[in-house]
Image: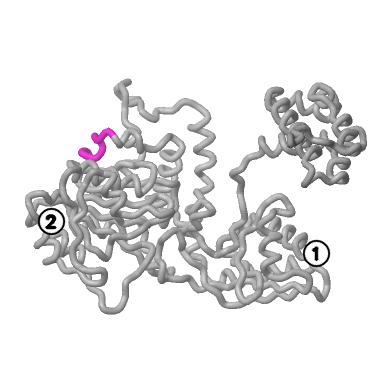
Amino acid sequence: METRSKQVLSAEQAELLRQIPSVDELLAQPRLAELGGRVDRGLLVEVTRTVLAELRTRITDQVKFTVLAELNLLTSGGAALEEHIRSLVERILAHSLQPVINATGVILHTNLGRAPLPAAVVEEFRRTATQYSNLEYDLETGARGQRDVHTASMLERLTGAEAAIVVNNCAAAVLLVLASLAKGGEVVVSRGELIEIGDGFRIPEIMAESGALLREVGTTNRTRVADYENAINEKTRLLLRVHPSNFRITGFAEKPSLEELAALSARTGLPLAEDLGSGCLADLTGSGISEPLVRQSIEAGVSIVMFSGDKLLGGPQAGIIAGKKELVMRVRRHPLFRALRVDKLTTVALEVTLGAYLRAAWDEIPSLRMIRTSAQELKRRSENFLRELRPELPLDEVEMEIVDGTSLAGGGSTPTQALPTKVIGIASARYSAAQLEQRLRRAPSGISVIARVENDRLILDLRTVFAEQEPLLIKTLAAVLH
């Protein structure tokens, strides 16, 4: 028996199909005509056609068809349909990357962009990024220059290295160093340092991509300098030390000191490279953060170091390679360097950040300022914050208190170290803590607030909230708690 291929529509479906306007009819309506004067007509036509096609599909779908939903779009002279199209176009054109308020207490929050840049960077962007600049032009000779010069001397002064170059992140720096100095040869690494960094990138995989051969020595928890020495052969090109920025091995553990590895490097003539990860340039032990300084590695005799620009350094995303001039220049001459180098905006941001270090202007670097803020200061800020917030809230529905807490450096740095802080705990009679967190994240007042939940309370840590953001945070909280 022959089956019927033609779909049979109900009277309601047929009537709704007849009501669907044409593309030209819709675009002639006041709302969309006005929008057509502000955006590309091709985009507007494309979105309109897509919306009308989806509407026809919904109407003719025998399973999903609901008269009410389709009527809502087609009644009121098509106003709802116009608004739907306008909203879609505006959403397409809206910026996806947008500022948020970080109330988590995680200073170098990888998902939130890691280190916020110094305010002075904005002016330097305006001054140099919106005009032509001498990015690769030598003003003295009138010949082509190198973009490295804008940050090299500052990095050399701050780290004690003979030379320094910059690429787009630390993983790129490691890849480039291995490809330049060890391709086709062996690199000796402790098993306890074969780490995985963010988003699933692993040291062995980066090494494989570089063309270098991994030579593991020691065990996960114990490696001695003799293990490195016994592994050296005619194929060895490099000794590699990886600082475990995002984890710690404790207990029955042992690893050679930098001085021991540097001495082995000197005896054998093999370069010693170190992936320092977090890139700490200033001593932060007084603020509760203990991380090895880049200068300490250089002074201990490490041949070449790699570290991040947007972690404890507090600058833009970058991978910095510093060390002996001959080795750094070999790395710079590798063909991959051009593919991995940074643009003028990163150069400007890094130059401003390093300048603050040279002037010891720690508070100009937001991440350092946050790290250096005391729990006492945060308690004072929290008290003032609650004093401003309470009058905006419904009576007897919200409980708020200031309690002890901990902030984190984050960004794969100092995994076992926390900063004592004061946090604000909020409980609502109307909403659960999870609901409050979601409402804050969905930006009821135009900016998303990222907080955390502990013990069924919404937790706000003002350490990572800029003072100028507090009025907007108060307004947002008031809207969320009503």
Please tell me whether mark 1 sits on a helix, a strand or a loop. Answer: loop
Amino acid at the residue labelled 2: Ser
Range covered by the magenta-colored residues: 329-335
Viewer-side residue, 323 vs 223: 223
412 with respect to 452 (left or right): left
16 with respect to 89 (left or right): right
Residue visible at 68% across and 61% down in the picture: 438
Q: Which mark is residue 265?
A: 2
Viewer-side residue, 333 vs 8: 8
Residue visible at 31% across and 75% down in the picture: 250
379 with respect to 52 (left or right): left
Q: Earlier in the sequence, mark 1 or mark 2?
A: 2
**C-alpha gap between disc 1 and disc 2:** 65 Å
Above or below, comparing residue 81 to residue 43 in the picture: below
- The reply to whether discs 1 and 2 touch (Cβ–Cβ < 8 Å) is no
Residue 455 on image: x %, y %: 62, 77
The residue wearing badge 1 is 482
Q: Quadrant of the C terminus?
A: bottom right
Residue visible at 50% across and 58% down in the picture: 109
Residue 68 on image: x %, y %: 88, 46
Amino acid at the residue labelled 1: His
Q: Quadrant of the N terminus?
A: top right
